[in-house]
Structures are given as C-alpha cells and as structure tokens.
Image: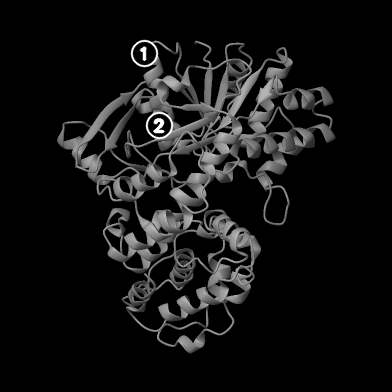
Amino acid sequence: MTLPGWVHFGIGNIFRIFIGGIADQLLSDGDMQHGITCVETFDFEVVDKIYKPYDNLALAVTLYGDGTSDKKVIGALSEAIAARKEDASARTRLKEVFTAPTLQMVTFTITEKGYALRDAAGKWFGFVQADIENGPSAVGSVIPLVTSLLLDRYEAGRLPLALVSMDNVSHNGEKLRSAVLEVAEAWLERDFVSEDFLAYLKDETKITFPWSMIDKITPRPSEDVQAMLEELGMEDMDIVITDKRTYIAPFVNAEGPQYLIVEDSFPNGRPPLEKGGVYMTDRDTVNAAERMKVTVCLNPLHTALAPYGCVLGYTRFSDVMKDEEMLKLAELVGLGEGMRVVKDPGILSPQAFIEECINVRFPNAYIPDTPQRIVVDTSQMVGIRFGETIKEYVALDGNAAALKGIPLAIAGWLRYLLAVDDEGNEFELSPDPMNEELQEVLKDVEIGRPETLQDQLKPVLSNANIFGSDLYEAGIGELIEEMFRDEIRGWHSVRETLQKYL
C-alpha cells in the first residue's frame, strides 16, 4: 500500500465534498500523486456503511439557486480507517503512514467538540482520562491518538509535519496545538514520553499548527436529492442515520460557493493547494478573514435569523430569507451594524461576501438547510457572533446603544427558548447545553401575560460567559428586555415586534 502525503481525521460530509474535492482536482491535474488517508475516530459506522461499500468513492452534488446541479464522483479518498481502539491492524497502518517521510500534512474536521478534553468543571472527560492513564500505546480518542502518532513520527527521526484544523472554530490551529500539548504534558508527568518529545512538538521547524478559515454550507443529505439521483438511475443512494446520529449517504449535497483560507506554514512541504482554490496566506490574514465571517458577514446572520425562523414556523432556511422582516433583520445586523466595525482581510471583500450570503447563498431554495439545524448550540456561539460587535461599539461610542438589530436578535433567541411558536404551537428545542438552565430561568414567563417578566433576564443578559460582556453595562440590556416583553404580549406579537423595530 502506498504511503500518502495527506491524512485527514473526521471524514463526514464537508470533508468529502470540499476537502476531498480539492484533492480530487489536484490529482486529476497531476499536482498530487496520492489520495487522502481518511481516519474516523468517533462514528465507525461512517466507514463501515458509506466508505467501504462504495470503494471510498463519494458523489458530490452541488445545488444551485436556479434548480440545476452538478454531479461529480470524488475519487481522492484512497483509504478509510476506522480507528477502533481494539483494532491492532488499524493502529499498525496509522503508524506506517505517520512514520513515512512523505507525509506532509494532517487535516481535521472533527467539530469544535473534538478538541475538548475536559468537562465544564475542568475535569478530564472519562475517555480522555483513560487515554492519559493508559499512555500512548492504548488510546481511543482523537487527540490522544494524534499525539501518540506524533510520538511515532518523533521516534522515526523527528520528522517534520503540519497539522491543520479545518474546523469552523476561532483560532482553530491554536486549539489543536493546545490540546495536543496538554495530552503530551500529561504523559510527560506519567513518564510515558520525554522532555525532548515536548520540545519536538513545540519546534516550529518540525511541527506546525496552521490556522485556517473554512466556509461552505453543507447540510445533511437531502431526500429530494436522493430521489433525483434515483430517477437518474443511480442505485443504493439510501441515507444512513447511524447510532450516533450522523446523517450520511453515498452522496453529499452542498452549495457552490466555498472558501478555505490557510496559513502557509508547512515544514515538510505541501501540495499546491492554491491550485485547488485555497487561499494560502499568513496567520494575521487568516484571523481577519475568520473574524469577518464569524463576527459580521455570515454566522451572525444565521444566529439572528434561525431562532426567529423556528418561532415563525419555518422549516427551510431559504424560506426564512423570503420573509420581509427576516431579510430586513439580516441586512440590519450585517450590512447595517456589522459593516461599521468589520476588519477587511484584504483577500476577500466583506461587502461582496455578505451580499453573496444575503442574495445568493441563504435564499438558495435547493439547499435543504433548516433553522432548526442552524440554531443548535446557540448559547455557545452568541458571545463571538454578537459579542465582538457589541464590544467594538462600546469601544467606539462608550456604549452599544446605537445597535438595534443585534438586540432584536438576542430577544428573538430568548423568545425561542419558550419553545412555543408565534401561533401558539409547541415545538422541540434544538440541542444546546444550556437549554435546561435557560428554560428554568424563563419558566414563570407566560405568553399573553407580559407582566410575568420581572427580573428573569438579568442574570442571563449580564452573563459575560454567554455574551462576552455584561449587556446592561454595554447599554442594551434594558432594550432587549423591552423587545422580549413586546414579543410575549400574545400570539402574533413576535411578528408585530419585528415590524415595530424594523
């Protein structure tokens, strides 16, 4: 078996259509000689039910707003390894790959949770604790496994390597580096590794953790797309829902626009990623592009509109964008309030980026995205998606009182947490680690009785752990309370409140 130059951890949908698509283009053009070694550490059914039965091929379906689509078979996924802790052959193969001098980079799409080693109380998760105590030879979770494979590479001659997080996480390269070093330091304390191994990981002439910014809307596989493919005569296109609730299929459906910006720091060389459409640049530019997307141009619009989309009864995000008030809110939060404080990364125009989101990407009716998916884990995101702009306004004006769209968005999220739509129908909240805590805070608030809102919101809106600052000190806490009170006056009052403030 060949020794590749590229390994990837976390081999779900965005990896297959976006990163796999880049590799496929480079292979087709003769700019890369080997495909990607694909490694799964979390949901092994992905390998067993989607990779192996289809010879590691994936069908990429790009959906355009006019109803047309492109279809392409991705053939760059050369092997798929289910890294089960008990599978000695998988570990042997990974060691073979990681000790190869030809290996240039390891990339990751393991989601933000993949980098977490400790719980909210600061204690190791149980599975991480086991990997720490058992040492490098008996690991099961992704960060300890990667660290143990880096130990193999160190012992093979201190070979250089770049480890590139491509997750939609702020400062993703730093998070990956910190996690790897934390495991290595814990092993050092237990005499599993040497000080010299730690020095190797910290030596940027040997090991680097480049930062990146990634953007491509890649929803779950769509039944409509499955039906379309079957009408074309394609067989065995069934969508699989694994025991771990991964939605995956032989095909991947996604939008056309895509952006990947990567810090160019590769001590063992790299493929010509720029020929696959990747922007290769410096860390400051990556950081500016990531902040542009996450704090102004895309993610804040998603987070502003998705809770309202649920409360107004929408089940497709493209339909949310057809709503007059929702479009006004998106334009106010992004083009109105965000553009005042956005930092231009230079390689992408913030104005053009946000206009593409509002006018092309979000309204694409053929992208089967939902407000219910987008609203997942909102409590973990409002601090960066809204909080940074709030802090910028405070720095410029002394307070954020000039903001109207962001306070309205926050009020809408709080109204969503009541789990009743604007018609009076109950709905199920999307997963969020703070749902239970926040619903307990709001339990005595009744729609139709605005007087039931007393001081319940104060501990929430003053919580800097949620929003990045105390919103009362920022000058918008009382406004959010007023907007929320308007939204609970009765049925249809959410719509009326939107009309009032927009």
Q: Residue at x 64, y 15 (%)?
A: 99
The residue tagged 2 is 18
Looking at the picture, does residue 60 appear above or below residue 430? Answer: above
Rounded to the nearest whole Å, what is the CA distance between mark 1 and mark 2?
A: 17 Å
Q: Residues within 10 Å of mark 1 (few under 14, many from 20)?
A: few
Looking at the picture, does residue 402 appear above or below residue 237? Answer: below
The residue tagged 1 is 29
Q: Position of residue 449 (x, y in %)?
A: 44, 88
Q: Which amino acid is tagged 2?
A: Phe
Could you tell me which secondary element the residue under label 2 belongs to?
helix
Q: Position of residue 23 (x, y in %)?
A: 42, 21
Q: Residue at x 62, y 11 (%)?
A: 101
* Residue closer to the observer: 289 or 80: 289
Q: Residue at x 33, y 42 (%)?
A: 221
Is residue 90 left or right of 192 when viewed as pictured? left
Q: Residue at x 28, y 26 (%)?
A: 72
Q: Position of residue 484 (x, y in %)?
A: 47, 76
Q: Which residue reaches farthest front?
A: 397
Is residue 463 left or right of 1 when viewed as pictured? right
Q: Residues within 10 Å of mark 2 (few under 14, many from 20)?
A: many
User: On the rendered image, what quadrant is the C terminus found in?
Assistant: bottom left
The image quadrant that residue 150 belongs to is top right
